[in-house]
């Protein structure tokens, strides 16, 4: 990894992609070992690749139940892959070099900047240290809070392991769980009315999903909201709306058979987890088609830049909405909180939206045709994959090899990022700065 980071033959975007691919490959090899499965036979290449991709891309889609199929070693490998994928392969690798006392060069700093979506190279090593400390503190606190729920039920050994596993999985927005010993693929359905588990998991998901730059703003400026970066203000506002409004829909329009307390926690958890985390406490197959469509939209939006989450990102949707509002009001520039949005940001947001939409729809069309399943069901799975969410209507374990490969590609695209892949592919494209003559075109 060090040689790769120091090589100037690769652009920052190419290094990011190769790092994720290397982590997935290594994870696949480890999961194929006999010690990784409960039966001692090891996973097949296809199952290992799918699981490793899902873990590194912090998605949570699985073809085998995590609790019953994988051994303790296999679960530990999955947890390590989740941690590396959530923090970012580059961040973890460079942090090891920093702790060992080795100097970080400009190329490595630029790669770190791209990997964590930092606004500038300056202070990137300090920011990386802050990210690791923040993650350790939040995950540790989450594990401690989950102990009273898991230890009485599973005993001290398994209880501590379950608390740690679910705290890391929730903070990294991965959605992997170890509750299959109750019922395969049951996730958190047994805790639908448990306030402690629901509040802790939701807090961990939100903490991981708003991004480390936002946490840096919170640390620096605390309650002085006016001093926050424009991006942090947008992320906090949009995240709040995307939690409260869907929760209201779920509470009033879904889960009608549940008691009030369970209905409240189910509505809040599904609203929070749908955008990136993949835990569920309800039977998603029993939702109305409107509810499933709402979840598809939330999964595509995802979390925020520089976070453990995937998806198009909250800022992408916000920029598109602000741009549309500027057009409606016949204003030249979109703006937030008294600040203009650069035209380049609007173009990037439009390109990301189009790429996600095309891949999400085309992937669903392929899976629907190959597997002969309803389009909405296929759309749900592809949205979950490209949004790195992990929610499913129960069809992923039954999919064929071609459909699983489609989901693998979508998970990788959703975690690494569309622009990263495009920039990596076109990094050597010659740009001569030539402008073509301008001519108007009518749209809308």
Image (tube, rainbow, N blue to C red):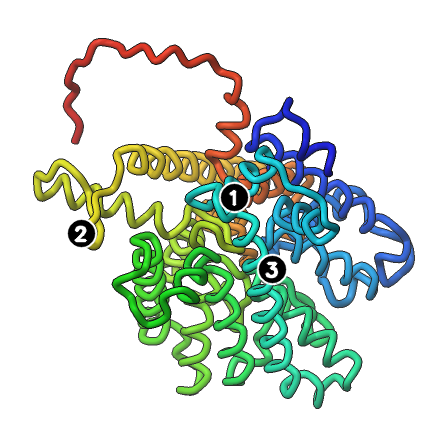
Q: Nearer the viewer, residue 18 or 70?
A: 18
Judge from the rendering whether residue 287 lies leftward or rightward of residue 424; answer left or right. left
Of label 1 and label 3, which has the lower sequence position?
3
Tell me the crowding category of disc 1: few under 14, some 14 to 19, or many 20 or more residues within 10 angstroms, Cα based: many
Q: Quadrant of the N terminus?
A: top right
Q: Which label number is shown at residue 338?
A: 2
Tell me the crowding category of disc 2: few under 14, some 14 to 19, or many 20 or more residues within 10 angstroms, Cα based: few
Callout in the foreground (1, 3):
3
Q: Position of residue 301 (x, y in %)?
A: 40, 51
SS for callout 3: helix
Residue bearing mark 1: 414
Residue 372 visible somewhere in the drawing = no
Q: Residue at x 68, y 49 (%)?
A: 98
Callout in the foreground (1, 2):
2
Residue bearing mark 3: 132
Q: Nearer the viewer, residue 149 or 406?
A: 149
Tell me the crowding category of disc 3: few under 14, some 14 to 19, or many 20 or more residues within 10 angstroms, Cα based: some
Q: Residue at x 41, y 49 (%)?
A: 313
SS for callout 1: helix
Q: Nearer the viewer, residue 253 or 71?
A: 71
SS for callout 2: loop
Which corner quadrant of the image does residue 38 belong to? bottom right
Of label 1 and label 2, which has the lower sequence position?
2
On screen, 154 above or below 298?
below
Residue 76 visible somewhere in the drawing = yes
Q: Residue at x 36, y 35 (%)?
A: 348
Q: Which label number is shown at residue 319?
A: none
């Amino acid at each position: 990894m060090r040689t790769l980071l120091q090589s100037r033959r690769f652009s920052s975007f190419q290094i990011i992609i190769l790092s994720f691919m290397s982590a997935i490959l290594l994870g696949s090899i480890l999961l194929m070992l006999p010690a990784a499965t409960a039966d001692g036979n090891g996973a097949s290449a296809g199952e290992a690749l799918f699981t490793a991709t899902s873990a590194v891309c912090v998605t949570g889609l699985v073809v085998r139940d995590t609790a019953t199929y994988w051994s303790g070693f296999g679960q530990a490998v999955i947890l390590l892959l989740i941690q590396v994928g959530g923090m970012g392969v580059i961040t973890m690798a460079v942090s090891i070099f920093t702790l060992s006392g080795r100097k970080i060069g400009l190329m490595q700093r630029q790669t770190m900047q791209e990997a964590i979506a930092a606004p500038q190279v300056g202070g990137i090593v300090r920011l990386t240290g802050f990210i690791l400390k923040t993650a350790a503190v939040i995950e540790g606190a989450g594990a401690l809070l989950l102990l009273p729920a898991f230890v009485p039920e599973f005993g001290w050994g398994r209880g501590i392991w379950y608390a740690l596993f679910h705290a890391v999985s929730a903070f990294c927005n991965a959605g992997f769980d170890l509750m299959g010993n109750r019922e395969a693929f049951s996730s958190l359905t047994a805790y639908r009315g448990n306030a402690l588990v629901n509040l802790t998991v939701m807090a961990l998901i939100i903490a991981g999903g708003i991004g480390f730059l936002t946490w840096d703003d919170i640390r620096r400026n605390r309650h002085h909201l006016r001093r926050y970066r424009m991006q942090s203000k947008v992320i906090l506002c949009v995240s709040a709306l995307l939690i409260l409004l869907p929760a209201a829909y779920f509470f009033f329009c879904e889960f009608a058979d549940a008691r009030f307390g369970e209905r409240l926690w189910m509505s809040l958890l599904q609203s929070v987890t749908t955008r990136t985390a993949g835990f569920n406490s309800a039977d998603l197959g029993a939702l109305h088609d409107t509810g499933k469509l709402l979840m598809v939209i939330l999964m595509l939006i995802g979390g925020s830049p520089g976070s453990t989450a995937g998806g198009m990102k909250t800022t992408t949707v916000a920029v598109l909405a602000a741009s549309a509002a500027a057009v409606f009001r016949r204003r030249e520039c979109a703006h937030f909180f008294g600040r203009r949005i650069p035209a380049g940001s609007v173009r990037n947001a439009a390109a990301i939206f189009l790429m996600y939409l095309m891949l999400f729809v085309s992937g669903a069309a392929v899976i629907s045709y190959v597997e002969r399943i309803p389009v909405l069901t296929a759309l749900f799975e592809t949205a979950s994959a490209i949004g790195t969410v992990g929610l499913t209507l129960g069809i992923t374990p039954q999919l064929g090899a071609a459909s699983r490969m489609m989901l693998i590609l979508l998970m990788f695209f959703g975690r690494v990022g569309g622009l990263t892949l495009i920039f990596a592919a076109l990094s050597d494209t010659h740009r001569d700065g030539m402008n073509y003559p301008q001519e108007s075109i009518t749209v809308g």
